Image (cartoon, rainbow, N blue to C red):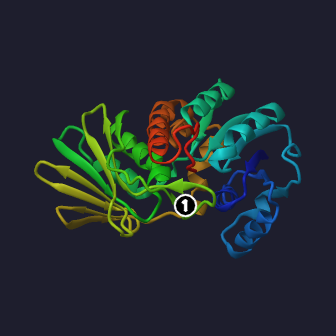
Amino acid sequence: MKNILVVGIGNFGSWWVLSLSKIKTPAKIYCFDTDQSKYNVLKKRLDNDKSLALNEHKLCFINSISDAQKNLDVIVVSTNADIRLKIIQELRQLYSTKNWIIEKVLVQSSDQLKTLVDCLDKQKVYVNHSRRLQPATKFCKNILDNNAPLKKVRYLGGRWELLSNSFHFIDLFSYWFDAELIKIDTTELNNHWHPSATRHGFFDVRGILKVKFNNNIELIMDWSKDNNDSTWIFDYVDEEIKYHELSGEIFKNNILLKSMPLLKFSEMGQFLEPILIGNNKSEKILPQLIEVKKSTSLLLDAFLNHWRVSNDKESQIVPIS
């Protein structure tokens, strides 16, 4: 039986538990949150999901972060970004684990990121950019031509917060085109920071965020309009490809090319199982911390500078999560 610890049983943390409860490999899943009322939310989600394999697994709701078995196979850290570094430092002292999976936004400054990387030195650490697991994402990787003259890539957003989710979009671009982030332009972002729609106590902005990669292609993330869009647009010289994230539909020159099923996060445990059992395929499922370190650092520096200009010039962290 494998041993897993999930720390942070909020919205994403509870989906993690549901997802892990569907894997084939028997597991003991420890759940911890400082706010134990969240256990009730998780229990309701477990009761409502009839596709669980709970007869193969054991769930343990622990009262203290130190109450799990000391030798683990995976630690999942799904807390908010403001406390994540402190939590991971504590976990490193308490446990030995074969793998880590950490939610974005990893931390709130490049200085914190450096400390995090040092803390997890020589550990196998995955970052949960789970959009890579969607069937439509993999289909796009197969049809997007890295050698064709691509003029630009646009993401028309609005459904999710821009800055906190930009880490996902940049990871997808890097995944599709094997490219590295080199430059960030925040000049067209709004100066007004609004409270996050999903995470109490954090902030985000609208506007346009432009980034450039080492393949000389620019990605434009456009949150300038008040809409609920979530569409990738790939502008080639002689064709256009669109990918609608909410529907899984992919179009070529406005003709439907493919409609792919959309996986809920609670259905993705099957893809994460190689990480749990130590299969070599695990290396390609999610990006590792060392792979996203540079892009994450560049983004955090750019966002912190924008926060300083528009709000608090003395701030040492950018309040996103």
Residue marked by disc 1:
195
Horizontally, residue 263 falls left or right of residue 212, namely: right
In this rendered view, identify the residue nearer to me: 159 or 312. Answer: 312
Task: State the image coordinates of residue 237 (x, y, percent, origin top left).
Answer: 12, 48
Residue 277 can be seen in this image:
no
Horizontally, residue 94 falls left or right of residue 20, namely: right
Q: Residue sitting at 47 percent across and 35 percent down?
A: 301
Q: Residue sitting at 69 percent across and 75 percent down?
A: 48
Residue density around tag 1, few if under 14, some if 14–19, many if 20 or more, within 10 Å: some
Task: State the image coordinates of residue 154 (x, y, percent, origin top left).
Answer: 28, 53
Residue 294 can be seen in this image:
yes
Horizontally, residue 230 falls left or right of residue 262, namely: left
In this rendered view, identify the residue nearer to me: 176 or 292. Answer: 292
Q: Residue sitting at 39 percent across and 41 percent down?
A: 175
In this rendered view, identify the residue nearer to me: 145 or 35. Answer: 35
The answer to which quarter of the image holds residue 126 is: top right
Compared with 74, 203 (above or below) is below
Task: State the image coordinates of residue 122 (x, y, percent, origin top left).
Answer: 65, 24
The answer to which quarter of the image holds residue 127 is: top right
Task: State the image coordinates of residue 190 (x, y, percent, origin top left).
Answer: 38, 54
Amino acid bearing label 1: Pro
Q: Residue sitting at 82 percent across and 61 percent down?
A: 36
The answer to which quarter of the image holds residue 63 is: bottom right
Horizontally, residue 228 falls left or right of residue 113, namely: left
